[in-house]
Image: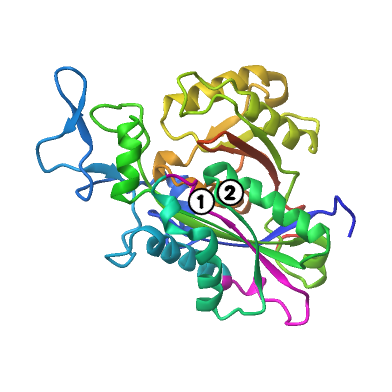
């Protein structure tokens, strides 16, 4: 296979607070549906007269966006597993992803929560992949790569999968992204840093959760087996931001600029008309995008539509890449996309930034 052989998306699955499938999620995002609720499982910190953090009186809880169908005490690693399993089953229900047993190996690629003092104890990088393959009854496949890098990792892992397909190590890839912020210990860390929306932080994130699953393969292989081609991928661009959200300075925009330029360099000469991203209500992220959009004004153009699904889902971390792709595919399939391609980008707390172009299939190619 040539190094730049086109890579197709031939299947997608998802579970989110606004949809039990990828199709439902895309439709709900288009309609602007959200299910934000005051959840009593975590009471955010308030503020005393001196501005210090104190427990808030009353029965109110944090505003959150949760998948209501998950079993009740699923928390931490168990909750991530349930989310990933449901998204993967949604993917595998699609007949288009069924392949012949002798068609070559499948590699699994995982995008997982960014490691912190809480998620490190979940040991997801070692346990989630084998547990999924065991539950799905797929001993012939293997976990090829794991990225515990949150939002940007969910796009960067696509580059890992593309390289493995083009290099001949695997015939196809299943890329799973799963994350949850519906966890008291994790919310406590974010709350102390003024990062969740609360009486102390009006410009904070709304905690959410989601999981997505994608199938990738070479476009040539998809055509040979008459699979439905939902879209093709451009090159994945990455960069590193030196001034992270954990510091006391605003983002320099350096990492996101690098990632976007790399993604755009492999595409058409015209500016993208549809940009989908992981802006989530935090001021740091908004300032970063403002800096980068001015810096890349010529490349991005002035007429781009900016879409951020956190408006409906809240912060979904390592699931965001698949959510953005689901939204783009919905726009392509239903005819409401402003252009036959979309530019996606996302960032992570520790500085990783990633971007990729997603292109609608030419007429007559999609199933």
Relative side of 37 to 136, left or right: left
Q: Position of residue 335 (x, y in %)?
A: 61, 48
Q: Which mark is residue 36?
A: none
Q: Quadrant of residue 55?
A: top left
Mark 2 crowd level (few <14, some 14–19, many ≥20, 10 Å Cα): many
Question: In front: 147, or 210?
Answer: 147
Colouring method of the image: rainbow
Start and end of the magenta stretch?
92-116
Identify whether 114 is placed above or below 283: below
Relative side of 119 to 350, left or right: left
Q: Position of residue 6 (x, y in %)?
A: 81, 53
Residue that carries the numbered disc 2 in the rendered image: 154
Q: Which mark is residue 319?
A: 1
Residue 75 in view here: yes
Relative side of 28 to 239, left or right: left
Structural distance between the alpha carbons of marks 2 and 1: 6 Å
Tell me what residue is drawn at x 62 percent, y 35 percent: 274
Q: Quadrant of residue 352?
A: top right
Tell me what residue is drawn at x 61 percent, y 52 percent: 329
Q: How many marks?
A: 2
Answer with mark 2 or mark 1, whichever residue precedes in sequence: 2
Look at the image and tell me in which quarter the N terminus lies: bottom right
Identify whether 66 is placed above or below 265: below
Relative side of 196 to 142, left or right: left
Circle 2/circle 1 CB separation < 8 Å: yes
Mark 1 crowd level (few <14, some 14–19, many ≥20, 10 Å Cα): many
Q: Position of residue 109 (x, y in %)?
A: 63, 60
Judged from the image, the secondary structure of the residue bearing numbered disc 2 is: helix
Tell me what residue is drawn at x 27 percent, y 65 percent: 72
């Amino acid at each position: 296979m040539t190094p730049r052989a086109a890579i197709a998306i031939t299947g997608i699955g998802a579970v989110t607070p606004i949809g039990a499938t990828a199709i439902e999620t895309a439709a709900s995002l288009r309609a602007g549906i959200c299910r934000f609720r005051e959840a009593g499982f975590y009471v955010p910190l308030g503020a005393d007269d001196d501005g210090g953090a104190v427990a808030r009186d009353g029965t109110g809880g944090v505003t959150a966006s949760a998948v209501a169908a998950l079993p009740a005490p699923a928390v931490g690693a168990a909750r991530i597993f349930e989310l990933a399993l449901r998204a993967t089953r949604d993917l595998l229900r699609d007949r288009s992803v069924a392949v012949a047993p002798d068609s070559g190996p499948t590699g699994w690629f995982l995008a997982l929560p960014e490691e912190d003092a809480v998620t490190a104890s979940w040991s997801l990088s070692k346990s989630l992949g084998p547990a999924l393959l065991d539950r799905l009854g797929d001993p012939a496949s293997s976990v090829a790569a794991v990225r515990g890098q949150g939002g940007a990792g969910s796009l960067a892992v696509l580059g890992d999968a593309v390289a493995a397909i083009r290099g001949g190590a695997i015939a196809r890839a299943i890329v799973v992204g799963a994350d949850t912020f519906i966890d008291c210990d994790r919310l406590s860390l974010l709350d102390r840093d003024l990062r969740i929306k609360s009486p102390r932080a009006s410009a904070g994130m709304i905690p959410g959760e989601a999981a997505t699953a994608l199938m990738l393969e070479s476009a040539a292989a998809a055509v040979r087996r008459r699979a439905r081609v939902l879209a093709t991928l451009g090159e994945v661009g990455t960069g590193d931001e030196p001034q992270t959200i954990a510091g006391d300075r605003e983002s320099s925009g350096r990492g996101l600029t690098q990632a976007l330029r790399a993604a755009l360099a492999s595409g058409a000469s015209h500016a993208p008309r549809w940009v989908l991203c992981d802006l989530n209500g935090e001021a740091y992220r908004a300032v970063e995008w403002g800096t980068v959009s001015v810096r890349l004004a010529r490349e991005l153009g002035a007429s781009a539509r900016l879409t951020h699904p956190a408006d409906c889902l809240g912060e979904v971390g390592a699931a965001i890449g698949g959510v953005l792709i689901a939204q783009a595919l919905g726009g392509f399939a239903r005819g409401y996309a402003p252009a036959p391609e979309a530019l996606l980008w996302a960032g992570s707390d520790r500085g990783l930034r990633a971007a990729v172009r997603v292109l609608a299939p030419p007429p007559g190619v999609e199933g």
